[in-house]
Image (tube, grey):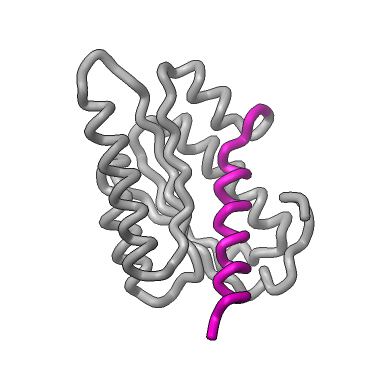
Amino acid sequence: MTDNQLRPGAENWRIAIVVAQFNPTITGMLLEGTRATLANAGVADDHAQVFAVPGAWELPLASQRLAESGRFDAIIALGAVVRGETAHFDFISTECARGLQQVSLETGIPVAFGVLTPENGEQAIERADPKRKNKGREVAAAAMDMIAFNAEVAP
């Protein structure tokens, strides 16, 4: 199934989208690609709820709270950590990834990783732009695939 086809049952899925506000141009493009993909698949607009957090560091905690709420079938975490001149990039990107994985493993709620970790701003724009690599589309597709997987293996 392609990312632009209706998905069976999608109209009933509830998805939280957590967006880091740091690097807002990049995260805005990721959000645009994510929302378009969900809509094309049949996810109702009011079933894809967007939550803002300051940056990538805050994504795991926000995702955990949303997963524990029991209100969502999946969570999509969007952010952009662009490499800089210090080790800050390494700490933030590594711990963000680890934290998001931990949330998914501990709660059983899929957390799709839509945090870009490019070398520079140009790479970030190329990956986030819905008209180019559209990583927002890819992360939305992964979240929907995992919702379907969870439904398939549910007891």
107 or 21: nearer the eye?
107
Q: Please, is residue 114 above or below residue 131 in the view?
A: below
* 93 horizontally vs 6: left or right: left
Residue 119 drawn above or below residue 114: above
Q: Which quadrant would residue 41 be assigned to in this image? A: bottom right
In reply to whether residue 135 is colored magenta, the answer given is yes
Task: Please provide percent x and percent y for residue 87.
Answer: 21, 22
Q: Which residues are magenta?
A: 132-155
Residue 141: % across, % down:
62, 52
Q: Is residue 33 magenta?
A: no
Q: Is residue 40 above or below residue 88?
A: below
Instruction: Determine the main secondary structure of the stretch shown in magenta.
Output: helix
Residue at the spot 69% in from the left edge and 74% down from the top edge: 9
Q: How many marks?
A: 0
Residue 135 picture quarter: top right
Residue 14's x, y, as percent?
54, 69
Q: Residue at x 43, y 24 (%)?
A: 118
Q: Position of residue 26 (x, y in %)?
A: 47, 31
> Which quarter shows the N terminus?
bottom right
Give me the residue at 32% from left, 49% from top: 59
Q: Residue furthest top?
A: 85
On the picture, is 87 further left or further right than 145? left
Residue visible at 40% across and 33% down in the picture: 80
The quarter of the picture where residue 90 lies is top left
Q: Is residue 81 above or below residue 138?
A: above
